[in-house]
Amino acid sequence: MEVILNDAQRTSLSITLSRLEIWLTQMQAMLDRDELRMRLAPDNIERIRALTKRQQAIVDELSHRFDLPRETTDDIRRLVAGFSVSWSQLCDARSDKLSRYGAVDLNLSPALDPDLDQLIEMTLGVIHILEQAYQP
C-alpha cells in the first residue's frame, strides 16, 4: 500500500529524522571518548552502538520509502548555529540576568561579567568569520 505524504508532512518527518541522525552521529563520536567509556560498561557501549546502527538503518529506510529530502547541513552553518546558541547562553549568564535565580552578590558582577563579556565578543567574532565564509 502506497502512503502519500503532503508537503508539510514530508517536511516535518524529514526534519524529525534529520535531527535524530545528528544525535546518532554525536552519540557515536561520544562513545569513543574516554570520559563516557569510563562511565559505561563495555557491553552497554556495544549495545548502544548496535541500537544506534539499527536506528540509522530505519531512518535510511524511511527516507528512501517516503522519498524524503536529506538535510545536508553545511558544517559552517552547524557551527554558526552552535556558536549562536552559546552566545545567547553567555549573555544570559551575566550577573544581571542571574537575578532571576535569586539575589545576586554585589561582588559577582566585577568577578564574572568582564570575562563573560570577552567570551561574548569572541563568540560574535567567530560567528562573523564563519558567516563571511559561508557560501550557500
Image: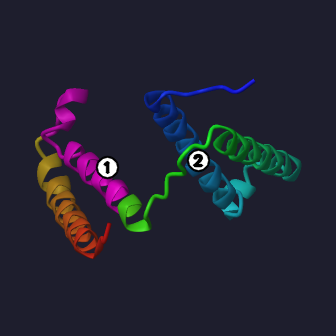
Q: Please state which amino acid type lies under the numbered disc 2.
A: Trp
Residue position marked by numbered label 2 in the rendering? 23
Q: Residue at x 58, y 40 (%)?
A: 17
Q: Position of residue 14 (x, y in %)?
A: 53, 40
Is residue 8 located in the magenta-colored stretch of the structure? no
Label 1 close to label 2 by CB (< 8 Å): no
Which quadrant of the figure contains the N terminus?
Answer: top right
Q: Please state which amino acid type lies under the numbered disc 1.
A: Val
Is the residue 103 above or below the residue 39 in the image? above
* Horizontal side of residue 105 vs 22, given as left or right: left
95 or 21, nearer to the observer: 21
Q: Residue furthest front?
A: 2
Magenta highlight: main SS: helix
Q: Which span is picked out in magenta?
A: 80-105
Q: Position of residue 56 (x, y in %)?
A: 71, 47
Q: Crowding near pointer 1: few (<14 within 10 Å), some, many (20+)?
A: few
Residue position marked by numbered label 1 in the rendering? 85
Q: Residue at x 64, y 43 (%)?
A: 63
* Horizontal side of residue 22 vs 100, given as left or right: right
44 or 65, nearer to the observer: 65
Is the residue 68 above or below the residue 2 in the image? below
Q: Position of residue 7 (x, y in %)?
A: 45, 32
Rounded to the nearest whole Å, what is the CA distance between mark 1 and mark 2?
17 Å
* Horizontal side of residue 39 vs 82, given as left or right: right
